[in-house]
Image (cartoon, rainbow, N blue to C red):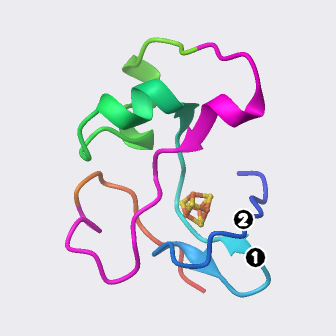
Amino acid sequence: MPSIRCTVDNCHYWHQGNTCNASEILVTSDSFGQTAADSVDAPQAANLNTTPVNTCLDTCCKTFVTKGSGQIRADGVTRNPL
Ligand code: SF4
């Protein structure tokens, strides 16, 4: 998996040096991200419809989950061992 850099340090998967430590992530359109259930994430990506957008401002990381949130296990994404 390519290295993913991220500055969203209140995410459960964020790690020092602005690194994403998730096993996989789902980048999608804002409109899909706002309407899909928390359980829909990277593990289901192969079966999702594509979601074209116009600019980077229309995309989001669907895998984001707030540190300490009760939703950490909602989607099957895990943290890579350090
Ligand atoms: S899951 Fe998304 S928001 Fe969270 S650290 Fe990784 S890239 Fe950033």
Say which quarter of the image contains residue 42. Answer: top left
- The three-letter code of the residue at mark 2 reads Cys
Q: In this view, does 31 lie above or below 2?
A: above
Numbered badge on residue 76 = none
Which image quarter: residue 36? top left
The residue lying at 78 percent from left, 59 percent from top is 3
The residue type indicated by label 1 comes to Asn
- The residue pinned by badge 1 equals 18
> Alpha carbon of mark 2 to alpha carbon of mark 1: how far?
5 Å
Q: Residue at x 61, y 78 (%)?
A: 9
Q: What is the magenta range?
A: 52-73
Q: Observer-nearest residue: 15 or 69?
A: 69
The crowd level at tag 1 (other Cα within 10 Å; few <14, some 14-19, many 20+) is: few
Q: Which of 11 and 57 is in front in this view?
A: 57
Pointer 2 residue Cβ closer than 8 Å to ligand 1 = yes
- Asked if the residue under mark 1 is in contact with the one under mark 2, i.e. CB atoms within 8 Å, the reply is yes
Q: In the shown orientation, is residue 67 left or right of residue 4?
A: left
| Residue 72: image location, x then y, percent | 29, 68
Secondary structure beneath dot 1 equals loop
Task: Please give left or right for residue 44 compared with residue 64 in the image.
Answer: left
Question: Is disc 2 surrounded by few (<14), some (14 to 19) or many (20+) residues within 10 Å?
Answer: some
Residue drawn at point x = 59 percent, y = 75 percent: 14
Going by the picture, which residue comes out furthest to the front?
A: 57
Task: Answer with the quadrant where ligand 1 appears in the image.
Answer: bottom right
80 over 35 or under it: above or below: below
Q: Is residue 68 magenta?
A: yes
Q: Which of marks 2 and 1 is nearer the N terminus?
A: 2
Residue 17 appears at what percent x and percent y?
79, 83
Residue 56's spot in the image, x, y percent? 75, 33
Q: Mark 2 points at which residue?
A: 6
| Residue for point 22% across, 56% down | 74
